[in-house]
Image (cartoon, helix red, strand yellow):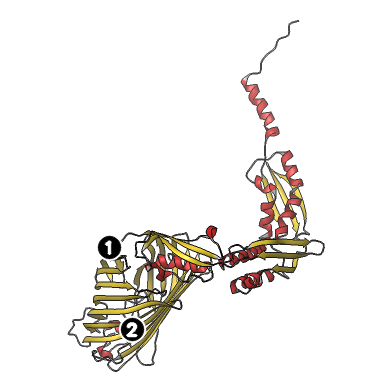
Amino acid sequence: MRRCSRRPGPARWSLALLLLLPAFAHAGVKLTVDGVDDPLKAAVTAGVSLSQYASREVSDAQIRRLYERASDEARTALQPYGYYDATVTGQLRRDGNDWQVTLHVKPGEPVKVNTVDIKLDRDALAIPSIRAAARRIERLRGHRLDDATYDADRDALSSALTAEGFLDAKMKVHRVEVNPPAHTAAIRLAWDAGTRYRYGQVKFEGSQFRPGFLQRYVPFKRGDYFDQSQLLGLQQALTGADYFSVVNVLPDVDKASHGSVDITVQLVPAKRTIYTGGPFIGTDTGFGMRGGIERRWVNNRGHKWKNELVLAQRLKTLSTLYSIPMPGPDQRSLNFGANFRDANTDTSKSRTLELVGNDSRLWHGWVRTVGVHALIGTFTVGQGGNLADTAPGVEHGRSELVFGEASLTRKHADNPDFVRRGWSLELYARSTAGSLLSTTRFSQLQANAKWIRGFTRRDRLILRGSVGTTWTGNFSALPPQLRFFAGGDRSVRGYAFQSIGPENSYGRVIGGRNLLVSSATVEHYFTHAWGMAAFVDAGNAFSGTRYSPRIGAGLGVRWRSPVGLIRVDFGFPVHDRTHHGMELHIVIGPDL
C-alpha cells in the first residue's frame, strides 16, 4: 500500500488561524470603584495596577493575577489619606471581549493626629513667619492624617527657616508614628536651625552705571538679617526700573562664612533707546497714530527721557518727561515735564499747555508724588453734537492756574499680563491754596480703585470705583480736565466719553464738582485666549448734594492677544429717556 501525504493549502491555513484566534485574543479592563468619592476614589483608581490596562490588552492569566492583588493595592492607596482600616471587596466578570472589575471600598475610621511634637531653637521660633509655619503644623492635631498636607506644612517650615536666614538649618527628626488599632498618629519633628546669617556686600555685575548708583534699589543694609523676600523685592525693583533685560539676584550661599552671605546681582543692559509707534483705536479718542522715543538711560547717573506724540480724531497731545534719580533707599526721583493737549469730546473742547515738576519716592509701600503744575489754555464746554461755538448755552473760558498736587498710588498683581488676584488704589489731592498766579482758587480730592479676583479657573470678578469732589468759588473758570464728567470706557459704559454730568440752563453738559462711579464685571474664558464679559456700571458727575446715577449694562468680548488684553464691550443705557442705542467701547492694555 502506498501512503500519500498532502500539504495544507492556503485556504486551510487561513481556517486554522481563525480557529486559533480566540486562544490568543486579549481583552481590556473596565474598572469601577464605588463606596468613596474623590479624592479617595481617584486615589484608589490610580493606585491599583488594573487601571493601567484600561486601553491595553490583557490575557486571562494576567487579569486574574492583577485582580488578586487589587484589594491590597486599594488599601495601600488610601493610607496617605489617613485610612488604615479600609476593607475592599470586588467582582470580576466578562463584559464581551473586555473584563469588568468592580471594587467596593469601605474606608473605615480614619487615623487622626493626636500628638504634634516640634523641637526648634527658641530664636527661630521668635520670628513671626517661622512661628506661623510651626503653628500650621500644630493645627494638624485633632484632624485626619493627610500625608500631602503634612508634607506641605513640613516643607513650608523648612522654607521659612531658609527664607529668614537660617541657611544651615537641618531637619534632625521627621517621623510620623501611626497606631492603626487606636486610629491615632503622632508627628515628631526637630530642626537644628544653626546660625542666622546676615547680609554681606552686594555686588553688581554687568551694570552700565557708575559705582553706587544701583544701591538706591537695595531694600536692606549690610549687617541686616538675611530675608529672601527682600531679595525678591530687589529683583522686582531692578526689573521695574527698566534699565536691564536680565536681572538675577543670587545669594552666594556656598561661600557664606562667619554668619555673613554676600549677594551677587547679575545684570544685562536693555536696549538703550526705544522707538514706538503705530495706529490705535479707542472709543474715547477715535482712530489715531502714536509715536514715541524713550531713552532708558541718558547717562551713567540713570537719567531718563521720554517723549510721545498722539494724533487722534478727538485728541492730540505732545509730551516730554525728564527724570533724575536721586540717592537713597526710597527710589526717589525728580521729574520735569511738559504736555500740550488738544481735546475735543462730545461735550467740550480744550487746548492747554501744562508744565509739571514733582518729587516721587517710595513711602511705606506706596508711590508718593508731590509737585507743582502750571496750566494755561482755552476751553469750550456745553457744545454737544454739531453745535457751533457761538450757539446759545456754549460756554467759553481761559485758564491760568498754578496748583500743587500730591498723590499716593499702589497696586498689587499676581501676574502683570493677566491678573487673577490683584488691586490698585490711586489717591489725589490738588489745590491752588496761596497761589496768586491763578484765575481762580480750587481744591480737589479724587480716588480711583480697582479689585480683581479669579473665583474659578476660567472666571474673574472685576470691581471698579471712582469718587471725587471739588471746592471752588468760580467753577466756570476751571478747564474740562479739572471738572468731573461720567461716561466712557473707564466710567459708565453704554454712554459716550464724558457725555453725562450736570447741565446748564440750555441742557448742555458742562461737568460737575463731584463724581461717584462704580462698576462690576464678570469674565468667563472659554479658552486660554478667548472669553466673554457681562457688566453693569452706575454713576454720574453732579454738583451739590443731588445724585442721580446713570446705569449702563452690556456684554463684551475678551482676547488675550500678543499685544495685551483687548476688551470690546457693547453697552446700553438702562431706563434712560434721554440716551438711547448702543455704545461700542474698545480698550487695549493691562488690567491694572
Residue 432 x, y percent position in the rendering = 30, 89
Residue 218 x, y percent position in the rendering = 44, 69
Q: Quadrant of residue 385?
A: bottom left
Q: For mark 1, does the 10 Å Cα neighbourhood hold few (<14), some (14 to 19), or many (20 or more) residues?
A: few
Residue 132 x, y percent position in the rendering = 62, 72
Label 1: element kind: strand
Residue linked to disc 2: 405
Which is nearer the N-term, disc 2 or disc 1?
Answer: 1
Extreme top residue here? 1
Q: Quadrant of residue 350?
A: bottom left
Q: Which quarter of the figure is the C terminus placed in?
A: bottom left
Foreground residue among 367 and 205: 205
Seen at 76% across and 51% down, the residue is 72
Q: Which quarter of the figure is the N terminus placed in?
A: top right
Seen at 21% across and 82% down, the residue is 377
Seen at 26% across and 90% down, the residue is 476
Q: Nearer the viewer, mark 2 or mark 1?
A: 2
Q: Label 1 near label 2: C-beta < 8 Å?
A: no
Q: CA distance from mark 2 to mark 1?
A: 31 Å
Label 2: element kind: strand
Q: For mark 2, does the 10 Å Cα neighbourhood hold few (<14), some (14 to 19), or many (20 or more) residues?
A: many
Residue linked to disc 1: 277
Could you tell me the amino acid type at mark 1? Gly
Could you tell me the amino acid type at mark 2? Glu
